[in-house]
Amino acid sequence: MLHRFYQYYIPHKRLFWLDFISALFVGVLELAFPLAVQWFIDSLLPNGEMNWIILVSVGLLALYVISTLMQFVVNYFGHKLGINIETDMRRQLFSHVQKQSFRFFDNTKTGHIMSRITNDLFDIGELAHHGPEDAFIAVMTLLGAFSIMLTINVPLALVTIIAVPFLIWLISYANVRMNKSWDRMYGNIAEVNSRVEDSVSGVRVVQSFTNEAYEIERFEKDNATFRQSKINAYKVMSKSLSGT
């Protein structure tokens, strides 16, 4: 599956490397910039050498500006990469749907198909943008932070390292709960889409039999179910982020 997913990056490899290298640069600066500022405040300022103070101040400002520009590159061109992959997948999925048998359309609600083509692919596009760079930067930041901590306070760094396996287990457990909640939420929005599609496409029949109140009641039920599933999903996410 990962190999198939990787194939979608190939037509946009230049955009991928621009986003990835920029994100890598931003990640390095996030580690190095605080250390540079600490050195500037603790060592350079007390010496009172104005020439060096001005030079380093200009250098730090330049690094901050470059980091800001790289953030723009990551946010804009990274999302552009995700949108391109999302568009390619949507084109491929639509072509695939067009080739399905009549039985497939008889057994699958139109709203579910619409949800797969729209909502689900939107999240896949976000994964295509954030997934590789976030995974690499997370590992790099973790190793870099521990290396810096070891140079500052070895016992405290070792205590922190011991806690890492527990944190990995906690994050994995939280991800399982979140995935189940999001799956239920996406299933419910597919039901809402299906209800809207059925009601709109059959509106003449509904109005002919003065059945509007019944259709509204059915929609309210599906809409309330989706609302509750979304609230539950965000509740699980909030608990996971807060560590509870």
Image: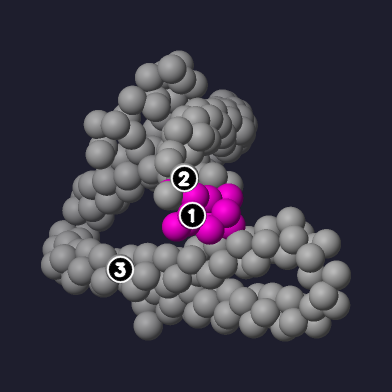
Q: Is residue 168 above or below residue 48?
A: below
Q: Residue at x 16, y 66 (%)?
A: 165
Name the image quarter holding residue 32.
top left
Mark 1: amino acid = Asp
Disc 2 and disc 3: Cα gap in Å? Answer: 35 Å
Q: Residues within 10 Å of mark 2 (few under 14, many from 20)?
A: few
Disc 2 and disc 1: Cα gap in Å? Answer: 6 Å
Report the residue marked by disc 1.
106
Mark 3: amino acid = Val
Q: Residues within 10 Å of mark 1 (few under 14, many from 20)?
A: few
SS assignment for the magenta stretch, majority: helix
Residue interval drawn in magenta: 104-114
| Numbered tag placed on residue 102 in the rendering | 2
Disc 3 and disc 1: Cα gap in Å? Answer: 32 Å
The answer to whether residue 145 is left or right of residue 161 is: right
User: Is residue 106 shown in magenta?
Assistant: yes
Q: Is residue 177 above or below residue 200?
A: below
SS type, badge 3: helix
Q: Residue at x 52, y 77 (%)?
A: 229
Q: Are marks 2 and 3 in contact (CB under 8 Å)?
A: no
What colouring method underlies this structural image? one colour
